[in-house]
Amino acid sequence: MKTAFASIVLASLCLSALSATAAADPPDLKTLSIGAPAPDFDLPGVDGKNHALGEYSDAKVLVVYFTCNHCPTAQAYEERVAKLHDDYKSKGVTLVAISPNDPKAVRLDELGFTDLTDSFEDMKIRARDRKYPYPYLFDGDTQATAKAYGVLATPHVYVFDAERKLRYVGRFDDAEVKTPKSHDVLNAVDALLAGKDVPVATTRVFGCSTKWSEKQADARRSLEKWDAEPVTLESIDLEGVAKLAKNETDKLTVVNLWATWCGPCVTELPELVTMNRMYRSRKFRLVTISLDDPSKKDEALKVLQEKHVAAKNYVLSTSDRDAFADALDKEWPGPVPYTLIIAPGGEVVYRHVGEIDPLEVKRAIVAKLGKTY
C-alpha cells in the first residue's frame, strides 16, 4: 500500500495544470466556454487517415476527448472511455480522442508510468495494442487544436450537442482508479440525448499538464543535466552477486551483463540509460555488471561514461563464470548481453539473451511497477 509520502511524490510527477503548471501554458490560452461552437480540426489519425470535425456531422452528441499515451491518469480512463464508446455509439454518440502533446516537450522522468512516448508512431502502437475502438488523432506538431479548445491537461473532455455547441467541459468523472461517485461525462451525454440541460456543465480537470512546445527547452536541459551526472564503476565479488540476486530491496532491479568487446552490449546501453531516467523516480534501479577482465576496468568505465550510464555499475572481480552464473541466475546460458529483471524478494520476472527490444523491457518494467497511481 502506498504511503502518504509516496502518493504525494507520485502526484507531483503528473498533476492538474490548473495551478502548479499554469505558468507553462501559452499566455493566451483559454478553455472553451459553455455555449461556444466546436473549433474545427483536421488531424492525422493512427488509422493512416486525416479526420476533420465535419466528418462527425451526423452525431447527436460529439465527445472530444484530449488524452495521451504517457499520463497515468489518462491510462486509468482507457477502459471507461472505450465503454462509453461501445455503450453509446448506437445512440448517436461519437467519441474522438486527440493527443495534444508535443512529444519533444515531454521529459524522460515524466514517462515513469508508461512503456510508450507521446510520439505519433507510439500512438499507433498504443491504439493497436489496446484496440481503441474510436479515432485517435495527433495534434502534437502544431497544437493548434489544443490551443483552440484550451486544453489544460490530459485527460480533458469536451461534450458538444447536435448543433456543435459546447455543453460540458472538464473531467471524465471524479474517480481515476477508484469507483466513480460523479459520472460527469455520462451525465452530460445522457442529458443531451434526453433533450435536457446538462446538470453540471463544468468541472475541474486533473491529470498531466499539456506538454506545450515551449517546454522543449526544459526537456533538453534535463538531458544535459543527466548527461553531467557522475558515472562510477565498482568491483563486485560472488557474495555481492548473490546478494544482488536475492534483491532484498524494495526496488524492481534491471541487471544487464555486458562487456566492452561486445558490440551489441555497447549499442544497447543508451536504451538502458533512457529506461533508468524514465523509471528511477519510482521503486526501480538499474545495475550493470561488466564481464571485462578487472585489469580493463578503466576501459569499461570510459565506455560507461561516454554512454552516461549513471547507474549502479560493477565489474566482476572473478573469472569463474560458472560460479558467477550460479550466484546470479542459473538459467543464464553464458552469452552477453544478458538482461534480467529481478523483483523485490528475488523473483526473476524477465530474462533475455542478446540485444534487447526496448519496448519489450519497458513493458515488463511497467507491468510490475504499474501504469497508474
Image (tube, helix red, strand yellow):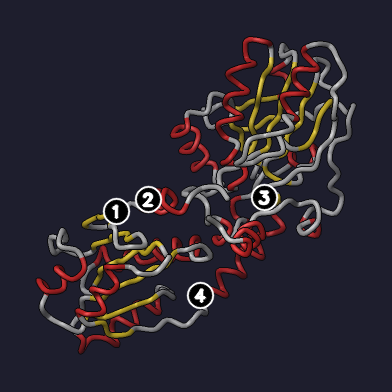
Q: What is the C-alpha distance between the residues marked 4 and 2?
A: 26 Å
Taking the image as shown, residue 282 lies to the left or right of residue 241, namely right
Mark found first going from the N terminus, 3 or 2: 3
Mark found first going from the N terminus, 1 or 3: 3
Q: What is the C-alpha distance between the residues marked 3 and 4?
A: 26 Å
Q: What is the C-alpha distance between the residues marked 1 and 3?
A: 30 Å
Task: State yes or no: discs 2 and 1 in contact (Cβ < 8 Å).
Answer: yes
Taking the image as shown, residue 280 lies to the left or right of residue 338, namely right
Most foreground residue, 181 or 212: 181
Give how far across and how far down residue 331 sits, in percent. 15, 58
Q: Quadrant of residue 224?
A: bottom right
Q: Secondary structure at mark 2?
A: helix
Amino acid type assigned to the residue bearing label 2 in the image? Ala
Instruction: Relative to 49, say whether 190 is above or below.
Output: above
Mark found first going from the N terminus, 4 or 2: 4
Mark found first going from the N terminus, 2 or 1: 1
Q: Which residue is mark 4?
A: 227
Image mark for residue 364: 2
Q: Which residue is mark 3?
A: 208
Most foreground residue, 221 or 290: 290
Q: What is the C-alpha distance between the residues marked 2 and 1?
A: 7 Å
Give how far across and how far down residue 154 sits, in percent. 68, 43
Q: Secondary structure at mark 1?
A: strand
Q: Mark 2 packing: few (<14 Cα in 10 Å), some, or many (20+)?
A: some
Q: Which residue is mark 1?
A: 350
Give how far across and how far down residue 103 sits, in percent. 59, 51
- Taking the spot 80% from the left edge, 42% from the top edge, the residue there is 204
